Image (cartoon, rainbow, N blue to C red):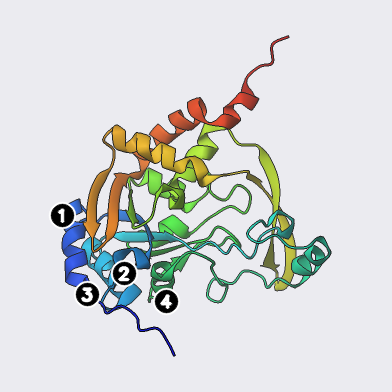
Amino acid sequence: MKTPQKAISQLITQKEILEELKELGVGAGMILEVHASLSAFGYVCGGAQTVVNALIEAVGYSGTLLMAMQCSDNTEPSAWENPPIERHLIKAVREQMPAFNKKESDTRGMGAVVENLRRREGIVVSHHPNCAYVAWGKYAKLLCNHQSLHFPLSEESPVARLYELKGSVLLMGVDYTRCTALHLAEYRSEIRPVILRGAAVELEGKRMWKKYLDLDIDSEIFNKAGKRLEEKGFVKKGKAGMADLKLFKADAAIDEAVRYFAKEHPYARYLQPTLF
C-alpha cells in the first residue's frame, strides 16, 4: 500500500512569476543568462513550461535568454567522480560515446527549465560537445554562433559575448555554484592549471574522440564569490514561490570575481614565487 502524499497546499502561476520578475528588475530587451531549479519554486502550475513562458514574457521579443545545457556524460571518463568508472571501461566509453548532437544529446543535471527552452522554436545552440549553451531571442545567434573547442568557457564563448553585451544573470532557486558566467572570471584571473579533456564529436561526417585543452575549473568557491558580490551591493534579491531570486549584471560581477579569485583562491599560492 502506497503512503499517501501530502496534498498541494499552494502553487505559483505564470502571472505571479512574471510579476516577481518585473519587481526584481527583469524587463523588456534584457539579455539574461538564467539558471533555475524547478523544484525550488514549490508547485508550479504548468511546470517548466510556465517558468520559461514567464521568462520570455518578461524580456519580450526584443530580449534574449541564455542557458547552459552541459552534456556531462560526454566527457573524459578517466576524470569521472560522481560516479567514477572502472579503469577497464574507459576505452569503451571513448570508443562508443555518441557524438555531440545539438538536438539529441542528453544533458545531465541541468534541470527541466533548460530542457523546456531547448524545445522551443527558434532557439540557437552553441556547438560544444560538453559546454554548449542554448539561447532564445534577439541576440541568440550572436551569443551562440561560435564557441571554441579548446577553453570553451573563455573568450570565445557565449558567456564572453554576454559580458560584452552588458547582459545580466538570473539565479532562480539555485546557488552561485550553478552560475557558469563566473567561470569566465576563473579564466581571466589565470589561477587555474591547464588540463586535457576529451569528448565524442562528429567531424566531416565521422564520429571520433577529440581531445581538447581546458582549465581545471571548479565552482566550489563560487558561493564565497557570490557572498562578496552581495556584500558589495551587486545583487538584487526577490522570491517567486519558494524560490529565491538573484539578479546581477554579468560584467560587473565577473570583474569583481576576477579580483576575488586572484587574491583569495587557494590556487593562487601556486603562482607565488618560491623563496629560498
Residue 144: x and y in percent read: 46, 59
Tag 2 residue: 52
Answer with left or right where residue 90 lies relative to residue 15.
right
Element type where label 4 sits in the image: loop
Q: Alpha-carbon distance for marks 1 and 2?
A: 17 Å
Tag 3 residue: 9
Answer with left or right where residue 159 lies relative to residue 139.
right
Which mark is drawn over residue 119?
4
Q: Alpha-carbon distance for marks 1 and 4?
A: 28 Å
Answer with left or right where residue 270 lies relative to residue 27.
right
Tag 1 residue: 23
Q: Decide: marks 1, 4 in contact (CB < 8 A)?
A: no
Residue 82: x and y in percent read: 63, 59
Tell me the kind of residue under disc 2: Val
The answer to whether residue 155 is seen in the rendering is no
Element type where label 2 sits in the image: helix
* Image quarter in which the C terminus is found: top right
Q: Kindly indicate the quadrant of the structure image that contains residue 225.
A: top left
Mark 2 Cα shell of 10 Å, populated few (<14), some (14-19), many (≥20): many
Mark 4 Cα shell of 10 Å, populated few (<14), some (14-19), many (≥20): few
* Mark 2 vs 3, N-terminal side: 3
Tell me the kind of residue under disc 1: Glu
